[in-house]
Amino acid sequence: MARRPQYDVDEVLTEAVQIFLEHGYNGAVMDEIIARTGFNRRGFYLEFGSKQSFLYKVLAHYQATVLQQILGNLERNQGLSSITQFFNDYVSLVKGKGCLLVNTVTELGYDDKHVRSIGRHYVDQLEIGFIGCLERAIEHKQVRADINIEATALQLCNYVQGFAVTGIIAGATDELELATEALLGPLAA
């Protein structure tokens, strides 16, 4: 008779998010992963196969439990207020630690096609969300009608990625809030 696992995979993945945020993929050593997640080595490799497959599951978990909540702001498509709320929530997320997905793409995206694909999909989601919100904002005269929607959406996507990096460097300062105001202010009608 098979034994039931003595762990909750979601809890393990949530703890692993913190480990990878603190150390990155290459800096996260198996001893710490095993110790902090409560796995033994055999159980870890039976469940996940490898550190790399584990990372992919951690990224999927992070997207589903953390990033999807923030992307929900754009999916509500309330125009400029959705974009503003997205950036407010994203700034809160990345302050002091960055974004696990952006950090991982920065660290591994050049060599790891799967990580690069995950990153590309995320940026595409962001861009589509920003385009929808900008179209709604123009309809409701919340932003200038003369903006190039696609170019502005792409600019916002690039700021998201830059905010993740600045979140690490700036720590608890108000730099990201100031940058958000400077970014979104000129769009207003």
Image (tube, grey):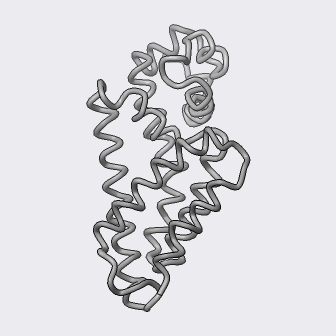
Give coordinates of residue 49: x percent, y percent: 40, 16
Residue at left 66%, top 15%? 35
Front one among 81 and 148:
148
Count of numbered circles on the image:
0
Q: Position of residue 81 (x, y in %)?
A: 54, 77
Q: Is residue 112 left or right of residue 156?
A: left
Q: Residue furthest right?
A: 172
Question: 12 above or below 161?
Answer: above
Q: Residue 52 at x, y = what percent?
A: 40, 21
Q: Position of residue 78 (x, y in %)?
A: 48, 80
Quick one: which residue is furthest to the bottom in this view?
Answer: 140
Q: Is residue 17 left or right of residue 54?
A: right
Classify 112 as above or below 148: above
Quadrant location of residue 127? bottom left
User: Which residue shows up at 44% across the image and 15% down it?
Assistant: 46
Seen at 62% across and 39% down, the residue is 169
The vertical placement of 147 against 99, above or below, is: below
Q: Residue at x 47, y 53 (%)?
A: 160
* Image height of 90 relative to 170, above or below: below
Task: Name the quadrant containing residue 36.
Answer: top right
